[in-house]
Amino acid sequence: MTTPADFTFIHRLRVRWAEVDGQHVVFNGHYLTYLDVAITEFWRHAGLPFPAALAFHQGDMFVRRNLIEYHAPARMDDWLDIGLRCDRIGHSSITVAWAIWTQGRLLVTGEVVNVYVDVHTRVPEAVPQGMRDQLDAFARGEALYRVEVGNWSTLQAGAAAVRQTVFIDEQGIPESEEWDADDAEAVHAVVSNLAGLPLATGRLIHAGQEPAHAKIGRMAVLRCSRGTGLGGRVLRALMDEARRRQLHGIALHAQVNAQGFYEKLGFVAEGPVFDEVGMPHQRMVIRL
């Protein structure tokens, strides 16, 4: 019998009114949409987020085959648990098995086969070893990321790539305000997947701060990897580095929409909200 325990990853979503047909059940074609939503989350949580991971390997993936078997209908407002696992990696193909339940009742089982292709020629080619290693680690429940802490000369390539994408390209911050002399003096943290794709970064500045205090800044996570805990990995790595240096406190300027993230890790708001690079920020502090 197919059960959620048979699958590596479970994604949950709720049936919407627009997905129910005249028979008052989910229209059959919407199950492939549910699969598409869930498999995007599968790749994200496997450390291979779309589209960054494919661009990193200079490839793309096309659906070659979809098999689906219907067992029972879903209805309006049902919560659906969608399970996925990678069953096979061939030369150029990746086979993912999937199933859907509501309240433990099996609704659908299926299988999707994707083919990996060269991004320029669109001709099938071997699935990169980095993707194979990432999927194998995900299936075994092993570590999916590497956290590096070091100086700018060592980590500039990864840190700069993430900051360029998040701050300059996404948020529209001028390049002249993003790069500064503090980078050369700061300690940087970069989180990458097993193949070396940089996904998150931040920096710790001690020089010029109050004695035994430091400042964390330039915290950034690629949009395609947000919600997977990478920001917390960066922040904890920098806090550990501050403790290693026997610093007693850290301050940071949090974008107001990220204030709750820092509060969960013990930071406390201090003073009024202020403008920085055209965005509302809140100073936050923590004692170590």
Image (cartoon, rainbow, N blue to C red):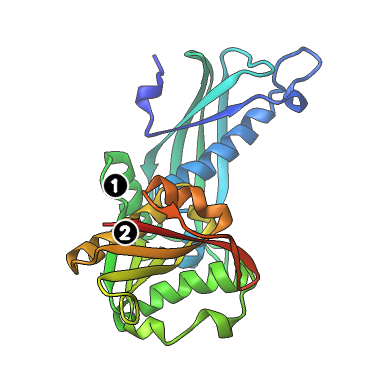
Residue neighbourhood size for the residue with mark 1, other residues' Cα within 10 Å, grouped as few (<14), some (14–19), many (≥20):
some
Residue 98 versus residue 258 in the image, above or below: above
Mark nearer the N terminus (2 vs 1):
1
Residue 26 versus residue 155 in the image, above or below: above
Circle on res. 257 = none
- Along the horizontal axis of the image, is 96 left or right of 141? right
Assess whether mark 1 and mark 2 are in contact (beta carbons under 8 angstroms): yes
Q: Residue at x 45, y 38 (%)?
A: 96
In the rendered image, is residue 92 in sight? no
Quadrant (top left, top right, bottom left, bottom right) of the C terminus: bottom left
> Type of residue at label 1?
Ala
Q: Residue at x 40, y 53 (%)?
A: 267
Q: Residue at x 32, y 51 (%)?
A: 144
Residue 37 location in percent, x, y? 58, 39
- Along the horizontal axis of the image, is 211 left or right of 104? left
Circle on res. 137 = 1
Residue 59 versus residue 94 in the image, above or below: below
> Type of residue at label 2?
Leu
How far apart are the two marked residues, 2 and 1, measured between alpha carbons?
9 Å
The residue pinned by badge 2 equals 194
Residue 269 location in percent, x, y? 47, 54
